[in-house]
Image (cartoon, rainbow, N blue to C red):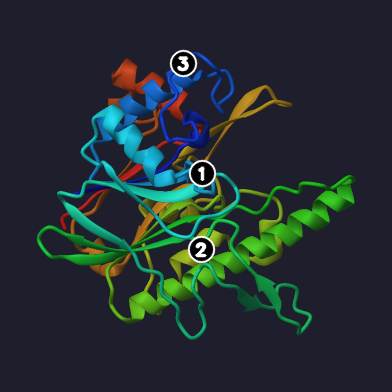
Amino acid sequence: MRIVTYNVEWMNSLFNDDGALLTHGGWSGRQNVTLADQSSALRTVFTALDADAVMIVEAPDDSKDRNCVRALESFARWAGLRARKAIIGFGNTTQQEIALLYDPDVLSVSHDPKAAQDAPRFDDSFAIDLDIDATKDTVTFSKPPLELAVETRGGFGFRMIGAHLKSKAPHGAKSRDGVMRLSIANRRKQLAQAIWLRARIAAHLAEETPLMVMGDLNDGPGLDEYEHLFGRSSVEIILGNAPEPVLFDPHAARALQRKLGAVPTTARFWIEPDKRFLQALLDYIMISPDLAARDPRWRIWHPLDDPVCWARPELRDALVAASDHFPVSLDIAL
């Protein structure tokens, strides 16, 4: 079975309010990429993935006037995908939902949010002391994680949590000191969200529930200059620490082991002031110990680093045009 996480940059801009795919020559949400080119590129990428399920980060908006499920299922029909049924959980106001597109002939999926004593549901709020002042702050998710109960056609049950942690941009700061204060405050919030997510993960692992946690964590070891103030990245918090049960992702493990040297990357951004691209490891599929025993194989569909993608010019170009992130797949016996 193949499970994928894929952040599709501004997928919302590819659809009208009725959920119909826009394939004309107007500009998409991606710089210098038309709607037609991004739609076509995504069809090429999703076809090549041929996944049983894709956790889509930055899925189309779900609101009063727009319907994420309708848009994704419209795209799946147009692209001829077997992963043709969509599901979302708690919506948000960012026009970037978290959704699963899956093959209903292979998987049964339901939105099944849970709460534990020290970890409320993801649409609730979480109390934590962010700045060590003996006063608890209230944290909420701008993009509540998507918590799913999944069962294969053969009857194997497991859970998925799709996440998009993102709260670090210092919007509104007008000075260097203001940027620093807001960046630190935003990182505190993101780490609090990671602690909340880890508490939900720990509850599942304590019950020995097979679990996958996937998505764009927008964080990782050595990603910014504020990390040393807090000691750990969101990725490390979510993975967990022995002797408690931990999650595993080989790309995260490799990055955490290296202070110098090459690490895997899943995203590629244009940095205008430097006139160059920045690459980063942001996207993960983390799995519980019982799933790690089922011959899992990860792959980053990076058009420049993966030799199979590089050798197929149509796929290579489509991966570049489709998004600033690249898919991460997990092939596993379920």
Q: Splitting the image into 4 quarters, where does residue 264 fall? A: top left
The numbered disc on residue 24 is: 3
Assign a secondary structure to mark 1. Answer: loop
Residues under labels 1 and 3: Cα distance? Answer: 20 Å
At x 82% / y 49%, what residue is drawn? 179
Expressed as whole percent of the image width and height from the top left, the position of residue 87 reads: 35, 52
Q: Does residue 9 appear in this view?
A: no
The numbered disc on residue 61 is: 1
Expressed as whole percent of the image width and height from the top left, the position of residue 215 reads: 44, 51
The numbered disc on residue 236 is: 2
Q: Amino acid at mark 1?
A: Asp
At x 48% / y 35%, what residue is drawn? 11
Vertical order, 151 against 133 (above or below): above
Residues under labels 2 and 3: Cα distance? Answer: 43 Å
Q: Amino acid at mark 3?
A: His
Q: Are marks 2 and 3 in contact (CB under 8 Å)?
A: no
Which residue is more in the foreground, 11 or 321? 11
At x 75% / y 54%, what residue is drawn? 183
Which residue is more in the foreground, 65 or 88? 65
